[in-house]
Each structure stands twice: as structure tokens, then as C-alpha cells.
């Protein structure tokens, strides 16, 4: 890592500003990486080969490779569920049950899905979004609202649950800084995770009472008039990729329910196995990958059983469905690749460390708790990664609390919640990008419509940490 300086802010700043101004996310991320590479090498010409080297390094990194593979596999799973009729059958079953006959019921349904599928943020977004988008179009609910609801019940919910990939990751970070009881500390921090709690609650209010403010109000009015996308919008997904089968399909809803339930069960089981009997020591990325592979295997087995009279043709269909789904995730995989590369680059430049050290040296100790939240938010916003922010901020915030002789749980919560806030608001965040993609809406439209709600939750959380800080 180079010596942190104000120049380390330049690559993420370029990526964020350009993405908002031009709507060209690929170009913006790529240019941010190139500028960062030039800073690392100290040469304009040297930046080009280093850019290629960094991208290749991201592809070959085991953790990043598993994220990219998971992205393609979840596309395969979702496309298969839809193509064999499981998604359509489940939606029809929900409609016939009388539960999904209005805008409010549909919006609440999405919120519930986001809360229930708490295993992994990307999984929450992709599954809930794929299930709900046809319903949102049917009831003329803005796709931007779908993106907001699934984005607001993904990471904010996951960070509140100890038994998932997020919990395992943060407990591991605490173990590395020699916390004697990392699991208990993580659990005790949950009530102080103000941003996540407010964000999930606010999403429920929006879903229940159709509360539209700022750009979201305009998006809802446009959609009610029959216009799904704004002028000049560039949807991040080819809608034909996950197109449902004809309405007269006789498929069973279990073709969707069984794979989803498998994911919910297999994920914690994977954590337990990879952690050798300890959930908190498990490998979150590998566990998610195993769970998705098992879900694909089960839906293939179920479909082939229903096609026992023509097994060869059924197998050929499954292969085609799977390849089509993986192809549909290619734009997202490319953006994730660039976002991960930029995140690694900002780490080498010391962007997060610079922001944290600057704040620590310029703010009075009495404001340290709300400061921790805001610095974590700024770091996540500029790097586009909550997990990267956790890795930077937790080793700073938790020992700082110990040195001050105050409770560590609020400081741990502020570091994690700030990471969620910044990631939630950032246009270069992978979860923000995923939400835009699976909702088939323009990415910057999603960022603009979501930001007012994120700022409300962020402002409330800042006030909460200020009040708790006064009481410490």
C-alpha cells in the first residue's frame, strides 16, 4: 500500500461523478481504475498495463472468482426457475390465494421476501427482484421502487443476522484483532445498528403506505401513466433473459419453492461445515456457492423427473435455460469485476485509511461515535464496498473504544452501519448495481430515487449515535 494522501480519493471520486453525470457505469469504473493505476505507478503510460494486471488479478483471486461464479450461477438458477414455469406457478398460486391483488400487497410481498431471504445480500436482491418484477409491471408500480425495496432489505437485513455470510465475515474480523468474545460482541452490537434498522423500517413504510418523495414520486407518476422507463433510460438487463413461460403452463410452484428453501438451509449448513462445526468461522463465499449449486441440482432433478418420457429433450432444455441465464448476468459480472478491482485499488492507495486518519485527527473525542458512522459511510460510498469498509473501520473503531474505556458494541455497530449506509447510497456499489439490473431499470435512476430515503435513514442514525455518544 502506498502512503495514504488526498490523491487517493481521486479514483473513486472520478468513478462516482462520471457514473452520475454520464450514466456510463462501465466507462466510469474503468476510468477510475486507470487513474488509480497511474497514481500507483507515477506514470501515465505505466497506468495502462497495471490496469490490465489489476483486472486479471481480480479474476484470479479466489474470493473474487467465487463472487463472479456465483453471479453466473444465480442467473442460471433464476432463469431455470422461470423457464420451467416454477416462478409463474408460484406467482399464480399467490394471486389465487388472494394475497397479491393490489399494489400494497405486492410491495409488502417484496419487503417480506427481502427480510426472509437473509442468507446473502446478492441472493436476496436477485431472487426477490426476479420474482417481483412481473408483478410490479402488472400493477404499474415503478421499477425504481422495486430496486429500492430489494436494495433496502438486502444488506441492511443481512448485517442484523449473525448466522449468515455477513455475520461470519465480521466475527472473523473481530477475531483477527484479538477480541476475546467476537460472537457475543457482534450480537450485542445489533441493537445499535441504527441505519439498518431504520432503513428496513422505512422500506416497510414505503411499501405499506406508498410513500413517494422526490424522484420516486415522479417515477411512480410516470409508471402509472403506462411508461415503465424514463426518457433516455438504459436498463441494465435484457428483459427477455428471464422471461417467464406462457401463462397456461401446468408447472408446480414447488419448482421455485424447493430451490429457494434449499438455499436457506444449505447456506448455514455450509458455514457449519467449512467452519468445522463453528458457524462464525465458516467460509461465507464458498457456502453461498455450494448452496446455489445444490439449488440448481435439485431443480434439474425435479424437472427431469417431470419429463421422464423425454429425458434427453428435457436435459437439452435445462442446459439451454442455464446458459441463457448465465449470459444474462454478463453485464452485471463485468460491473462487479470492475467494482471489485476499483475496491482493491483504493485499498492499495490507502483511501479508507486516509479518510479514517483524517477524521480521527480533526474531530473531538466526544463526537467519536457519530464520526465513526460518518467516516465508514464516506469510505463505503467512495469505494463501493461495505465489506471492504468493515475491514478498514472495525480494526480502527473497536480498539479506539477500548482505549477510550467505553462500550465497544456501539462503535462496532457504527462502523458496520456506516458501511451499509455508504454502500447503499453509492452508484459504484455492487448491490446497488445488482438492484438496478434485476429490476430492469436505469442504474442512475435507481440511485437518484433511493438517495432521499437513504439520507433520511442516515440522518436518523447519525442523531442516534450522537445521543448514544453523549451517554457513554
Image (cartoon, grey):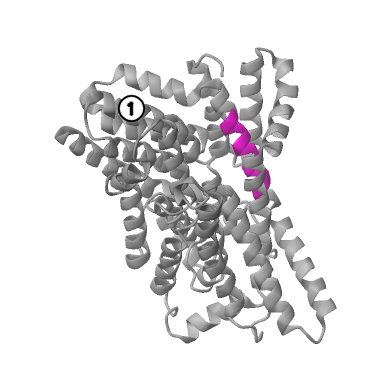
What secondary structure is found at the residue carrying circle 1? Answer: helix
**Residue 12 screen position, x and y as percent:** 54, 29
Indicate whether 471 appears above or below 92: above
For residue 292, which quarter of the picture? bottom right
Question: Is residue 255 in sight in this rendering?
Answer: yes
Q: Which residues are magenta?
A: 332-344
Classify 10 Å Cα crowding around label 1: few (below 14), some (14-19), many (20 and above).
some
Q: Residue furthest front?
A: 276
At 27% across and 32% down in the image, what residue appears? Answer: 369
**Residue 441 screen position, x and y as percent:** 57, 56
In reply to whether residue 132 is colored magenta, the answer given is no
Q: Residue furthest left?
A: 471
Instruction: Identify residue for label 1.
Output: 399
Which sits in the foreground, 385 or 411? Answer: 411
For residue 78, which quarter of the picture? bottom right
Indicate whether 420 appears above or below 345: below
**Residue 255 screen position, x and y as percent:** 62, 76
The reply, left or right, for residue 201 in relation to residue 89 is left
At 59% across and 69% down in the image, what residue appears? Answer: 259
Amino acid at each position: 500500500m502506498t502512503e495514504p494522501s488526498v490523491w487517493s480519493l481521486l479514483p473513486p471520486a472520478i468513478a462516482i461523478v462520471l457514473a452520475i453525470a454520464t450514466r456510463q457505469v462501465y466507462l466510469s469504473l474503468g476510468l477510475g481504475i486507470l487513474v488509480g493505476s497511474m497514481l500507483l505507478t507515477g506514470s501515465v503510460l505505466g497506468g495502462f498495463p497495471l490496469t490490465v494486471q489489476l483486472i486479471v488479478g481480480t479474476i484470479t483471486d479466489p474470493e473474487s472468482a467465487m463472487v463472479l461464479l456465483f453471479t453466473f450461477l444465480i442467473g442460471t438458477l433464476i432463469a431455470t426457475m422461470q423457464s420451467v414455469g416454477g416462478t409463474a406457478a408460484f406467482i399464480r398460486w399467490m394471486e389465487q390465494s388472494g394475497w397479491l391483488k393490489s399494489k400494497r400487497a405486492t410491495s409488502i410481498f417484496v419487503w417480506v421476501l427481502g427480510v426472509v431471504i437473509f442468507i446473502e445480500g446478492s441472493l436476496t436482491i436477485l431472487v426477490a427482484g426476479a420474482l417481483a418484477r412481473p408483478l410490479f409491471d402488472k400493477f404499474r408500480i415503478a421499477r425504481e421502487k422495486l430496486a429500492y425495496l430489494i436494495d433496502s432489505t438486502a444488506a441492511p437485513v443481512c448485517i442484523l443476522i449473525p448466522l449468515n455470510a455477513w455475520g461470519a465475515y465480521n466475527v472473523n474480523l473481530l477475531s483477527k484483532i484479538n477480541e476475546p468474545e467476537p460472537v457475543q460482541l457482534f450480537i450485542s452490537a445489533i441493537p445499535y445498528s441504527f441505519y439498518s434498522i431504520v432503513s428496513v423500517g422505512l422500506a416497510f413504510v414505503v411499501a405499506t403506505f406508498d410513500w413517494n418523495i422526490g424522484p420516486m414520486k415522479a417515477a411512480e407518476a410516470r409508471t402509472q401513466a403506462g411508461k415503465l422507463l424514463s426518457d433516455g433510460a438504459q436498463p441494465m438487463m435484457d428483459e427477455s433473459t428471464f422471461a417467464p413461460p406462457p401463462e397456461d403452463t401446468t408447472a408446480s410452484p414447488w419448482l421455485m419453492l424447493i430451490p429457494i428453501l434449499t438455499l436457506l438451509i444449505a447456506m448455514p449448513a455450509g458455514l457449519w461445515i467449512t467452519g468445522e462445526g463453528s458457524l462464525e468461522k465458516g467460509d461465507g463465499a464458498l457456502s453461498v456457492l455450494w448452496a446455489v449449486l445444490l439449488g440448481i441440482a435439485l431443480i434439474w432433478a425435479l424437472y427431469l423427473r417431470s419429463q421422464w418420457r423425454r429425458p434427453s429433450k428435457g436435459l437439452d432444455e435445462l442446459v439451454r435455460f442455464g446458459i441463457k441465464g448465465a449470459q444474462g448476468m454478463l453485464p452485471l459480472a463485468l460491473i462487479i469485476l470492475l467494482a471489485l478491482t476499483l475496491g482493491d485499488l483504493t485499498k492499495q492507495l490507502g483511501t479508507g485509511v486516509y479518510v479514517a486518519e483524517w477524521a480521527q485527527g480533526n474531530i473531538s473525542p466526544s463526537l467519536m461515535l457519530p464520526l465513526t458512522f460518518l467516516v465508514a459511510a464516506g469510505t463505503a460510498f467512495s469505494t463501493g464496498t461495505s465489506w471492504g469498509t468493515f475491514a478498514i473501520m472495525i480494526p480502527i473503531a473497536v480498539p479506539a473504544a477500548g482505549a477510550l474505556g467505553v462500550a465497544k458494541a456501539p462503535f462496532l455497530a457504527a462502523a458496520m452501519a456506516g458501511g451499509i449506509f455508504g454502500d447503499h447510497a453509492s452508484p459504484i456499489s455492487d448491490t446497488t448495481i445488482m438492484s438496478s439490473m434485476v429490476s430492469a431499470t436505469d442504474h442512475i435512476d435507481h440511485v437518484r430515487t433511493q438517495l432521499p430515503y437513504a439520507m433520511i435513514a442516515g440522518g436518523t442514525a447519525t442523531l442516534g449515535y450522537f445521543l448514544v455518544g453523549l451517554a457513554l
